Image (cartoon, rainbow, N blue to C red):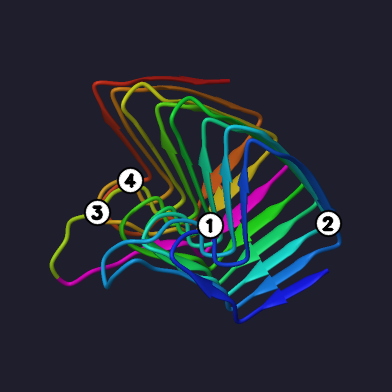
Amino acid sequence: CIFIGNNAQTGGGTYDKFATTIITDGKFIGNHAFLDANSGTGGAIKAVRGTNTLIRCEFFANHAADGGAMFVSGQTVRVKECAFAQNSADVGGAIYVANQSHVFVENSSISNNRVTIAGGGLANLGSELAASNCLLTGNRQSSPRIAGLGGGIYTWLQGATSMTGCTIAHNFATYGNNIAMEDSLGTIENCLISGVNARDSIYLGMSSLVVA
C-alpha cells in the first residue's frame, strides 16, 4: 500500500484507534497532520490504544507538530526493517512515543529527520522504547530561537529507553547531540556512538543511564 500527499488534522496517512493493524511493504510519502500552524500529531500514522506492526515500510518527508512520521499514544507497536528519512516535526522527527506506550524498533534506519525542539529521530515521553540493531544518523534539532535536546533520541518524564547493537552517529542538537534524557531511565548495550563535534554527545538531566 502507498500513502502519498494526504492531509488530516491527525494521522495524515492513517489514524488507528482501538485497532490491530499490520502493514507490510507500505510507503508513506509526503503526508501531513495539522490542526493549525503549531499542532497536529502523526504525519503518516497516529496509533492510539491498540496494536500496530510495521514490516519493511518506508516513511519519507512526512510532517506534523508531534511525530513527523508516527505518533504513538497508549499503544504497543513493533517496527521491523523500516526506514524513516527526511521527516520533520517540532518533537519526534520520526517517531513520538507517549502515554505509557510500548514501542519496539528492530533492524531499522532513522536518518536525516529534523525537529525544531527535541528528539530529531525518536522522542519518548513516559513510555517504553526499545531499539535493537538500528541506525540513527544525521538527525537534527535546529532552531535559531530554541536550545533543543536530543538530536538522535530524547527521553523525558519517566520514560525508559534501551538501545542494543545500534549505531547512533552524526546527530545534532544544542544539548545531547546523540542522546538526551531528563527524569528518565536508559540502557545502552553494544552500541557505537560517534561523530559529535559540538557541545556533548549525551546529555543527562536527573536521569540514570547504564552503558555496557
Write down the residue under mark 1.
94
Q: Using the numbered discs, state the Cα–Cα distance from disc 2 to disc 1 in whole angstroms.
A: 15 Å
* Residue 3 visible in this rendered orientation of the protein: yes
CB of mark 4 within 8 Å of CB of mark 3? no
10 Å crowding of disc 1: few (<14), some (14-19), many (20+): many
How far from the left and from the top, in percent, is residue 91? Answer: 36, 54
Q: Secondary structure at mark 4?
A: loop
Mark nearer the N terminus (4 vs 1) = 1
10 Å crowding of disc 4: few (<14), some (14-19), many (20+): many
Q: Amino acid at mark 2?
A: Arg
The residue most toward the right is 24
Write down the residue under mark 2.
56
Q: Using the numbered discs, state the Cα–Cα distance from disc 4 to disc 3 in whole angstroms.
A: 9 Å
Q: Secondary structure at mark 1?
A: loop
Residue numbers of the magenta segment: 133-144
Q: Secondary structure at mark 2?
A: loop
